[in-house]
Image: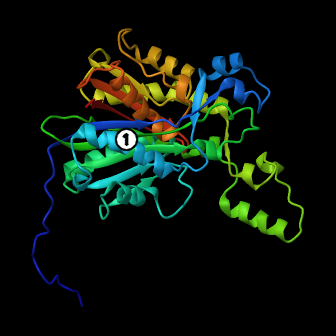
Amino acid sequence: MSLSPKGTGTITSPAGARHARISGVGGYRPERVITNEEVCTWIDSSDQWIRERSGIVTRRWAREDESVVDMAEAAAGPALQMAGISPEQIGAVICATVTHPFSTPAAAPLLATRLGANGVPAFDISAACAGYCYAISLASDMVRGGSAEHVLVVGVEKLSSVTDTSDRGTAFIFGDGAGATVVSPSDEPGIGPTVWGSDGEKWSTIQQRLGWDEILRRWEAEDAGQTVDWSDAQAHDARSASTLAMAGQSVFRWAVWGMAPVAQQAIDKAGITAADLDAFIPHQANMRIVDAMVKQLGLPEDIPVARDIAETGNTSAASVPLATERMLREGEAPRGGLALQIGFGAGLVYAAQVVRLP
């Protein structure tokens, strides 16, 4: 016997804004400055070697008692102020982070409560260095789909908590910080189509050395008096086994040769040309990667390019919004101008879109 539906009613669909835009941006950089000279007290290196290899001169590290949520809150305030909205007007909160210390609950609900927006949908996404650009795409769809009017997006990382200071290949790279934006309704297109994707075949090129299940198993073995060998993770204990490992050359080649075509697709899908851009804001992974992308894209020499990695290091999901905030604050990029932004990193994942700056 076949069943028939009980009713013929039509589901009501929410009506969203025709377009979305970034209406506000804010940033937070921790007070502590880590120089290359200090890094060289941890590893056998030099200021010149670090600069030539990465372009990094200094990076910011959070205090021990300074959390991902603390930094996100500090960045969110200026973003809300620039957008001209109150916490009560926030319709959703998205945090892009891989360094919130809890697998669950997420950082976003606590952030929403601290800001005075308790009760709104709030969630974290884990897309590493592409997390912010992923979140911008989600927020744009939410605004245009009618599920939220104003969405707070925060890219925030405390990478110092997962940095092995004895690893010569990664100890000099990472920094901490938070960048926030508000995505709001717009009469004109303010966020272009997102070009995004992933390459799981290169999943192991940037990863936590061991998964927590394996770390816990080995902890239990040590508690039982057994001798545990951590050398397979290039680690000497559970603390270093939980830090990040990276196949630097593989990631470098992937980024240099794979990300410029992604950025070009974002320009094409936005219906503009490189000459129309007022700024290029790539993920701050490595100065040589940034310079290579500029060359491959054939960007005009007068277009400002974010090179914040020199003073912030690689802040993963925070790097694009942090650079955006600085460029606007210092007048390097014009208010209301068009910017190409792209994030790429562990996963391997990537996302790029053209946005109109607030």
**Residue 334 x, y percent position in the rendering:** 28, 20
> Residue visible at 54% across and 61% down?
103
The x, y position of residue 169, in whole percent, is: 71, 32
Nearest the viewer among 275 and 283 is 283
Q: Is residue 22 visible?
A: no
Task: Name the outermost residue toward the left.
Answer: 9
- Side (left or right) of 289 relative to 270: right
Furthest-top residue in this view: 301
Q: Which residue in the structure is indicated by mark 1?
A: 180
Q: Which secondary structure, mark 1?
A: strand
Give coordinates of residue 36: x percent, y percent: 67, 24
Q: Quadrant of residue 44?
A: top right
Q: Quadrant of the C terminus?
A: top left
In the picture, measured across the screen, residue 335 lies left or right of residue 179, that is left
Q: Can residue 328 be spotted in the picture? A: yes
Q: In this orientation, which residue lies closer to the viewer: 234 or 351?
A: 234
Specify few, some or many for label 1: CA neighbours under 10 Å numbering under 14, 14-19, or 20 or more.
Answer: many
Horizontal and vertical percent position of residue 283: 47, 31
- Residue 14 found in image quarter: bottom left
Position above or below: 35 against 128: above
Query: Number of numbered discs present?
Result: 1
Residue type at mark 1 is Ala
Q: Determine the residue positioned at 79% across, 45% down.
A: 234
Residue 162 vs residue 82, the one in the foreground: 82
Relative to 108, does residue 175 appear above or below in the rendering? above
Query: Which residue appears at 53% of the width and 29% of the height?
Result: 312
